[in-house]
Amino acid sequence: MSKRDGDTAVIDYFNKGYLPQAVVNFISLLGWSPSGEQEFFSLEELKQEFSLEKVSKSPAVFDLHKLNYINSHYLKETPDEELIDLTLPFLRESGLFPNEKLTNQEKQWIAGFIGAVKEKVNNLSEVKEYIHYFSGTEVEMPDEEAKQILKGETVSAVLDLFWDKVESSEFLDSAASKAILKKITKELKLKGKDVYMPIRIALTGQMHGPDLDRIMALLGKDNLKARLDQTLKLL
C-alpha cells in the first residue's frame, strides 16, 4: 500500500479514520480473489477463505474508492457507541471536548453526532465537515436563494411557533424534535417544506444537510435560541 499511494503507511489510514476491520478487509482483497461474491470478511472468515493459491501474480492496484466503500460499510455496521473513542481525536482537532475524560452527557452527544453523520462520510476524519451543523451558536450566512425563502410570508409565524414549542419542551431529543416539527405543520396548516425549510435555514444557513431533528437535539436550547436570534435579525 505504501508504495502505491504516495508512500502512505498503513498506520496513516487508521489516523485518517479508517476502521481496522475495513483496512484488513481491503488489504485481503489486494490481489486475492475469493471464490464467491462476498465482499466483506471478518478475520475468522479470512482465516477460512484466504489462500495464497488464489493470489494473483500481477501487481495489485490500490483503489481508494474501494477502500472508502468498504470503510463506509463498516461505519454503518458499527454501533455508534463503539465509534466514540475513534471519533474523539477528530472532534478535538476542531476544538471540542478538550478535557481528557468525557462526561456521560458528552459521550451521549458524540454518539448522537456519529449516528447523524456516519452514513455521509467515507472515514471518521470527514466528520469535521459536519460539526458546524450540530455545535456552537453561529449560523452560516445563507445564500441568496435561502434568503428568499426566509422572506416568505409564513416564515415569521413558523419561527415564532418553533421557538415556543422548543422552549416549552421538557426534553429535546430526536423524537421530541420530530414531534415539534409535526405539530407546527399541523397547527399552522402548512406543507412540510414550508415548515422544515425555513427552520433548517434559520438554524444552519443552508437548504440541505443532516436530519433536522438530529440537528435540533444536538444543538440544545441555548444554541437554538442564539442561532434563531441571528437569523431573525436578517428578516
Image (tube, rainbow, N blue to C red):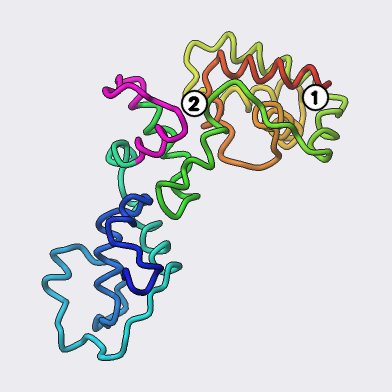
Nearest to the observer: residue 66 or residue 174: 66
How many dots with numbers? 2
Please state which amino acid type lies under the numbered disc 2. Answer: Leu
Up-down relation of residue 189 to residue 67 (above or below): above
Nearest to the observer: residue 95 or residue 160: 95
Lower position in the chain sequence, tag 2 or tag 1: 1
Q: Quadrant of the N terminus?
A: bottom left
Q: Is residue 71 magenta?
A: no
Find disc 1 in the rendering and name its residue.
155
Q: Quadrant of the C terminus?
A: top right
Say what secondary structure mark 2 lies in: helix
Nearest to the observer: residue 206 or residue 95: 95
Residue 111: percent from left, percent from top: 37, 33
Up-down relation of residue 23 to residue 164 (above or below): below
Q: Is residue 95 magenta?
A: yes
Residue at screen point 74% across, 22% down: 231
Q: Which residues are magenta?
A: 87-107
Q: Residues within 10 Å of mark 2 (few under 14, many from 20)?
A: many
Up-down relation of residue 84 to residue 105 (above or below): below
Q: 109 left or right of 42?
A: right
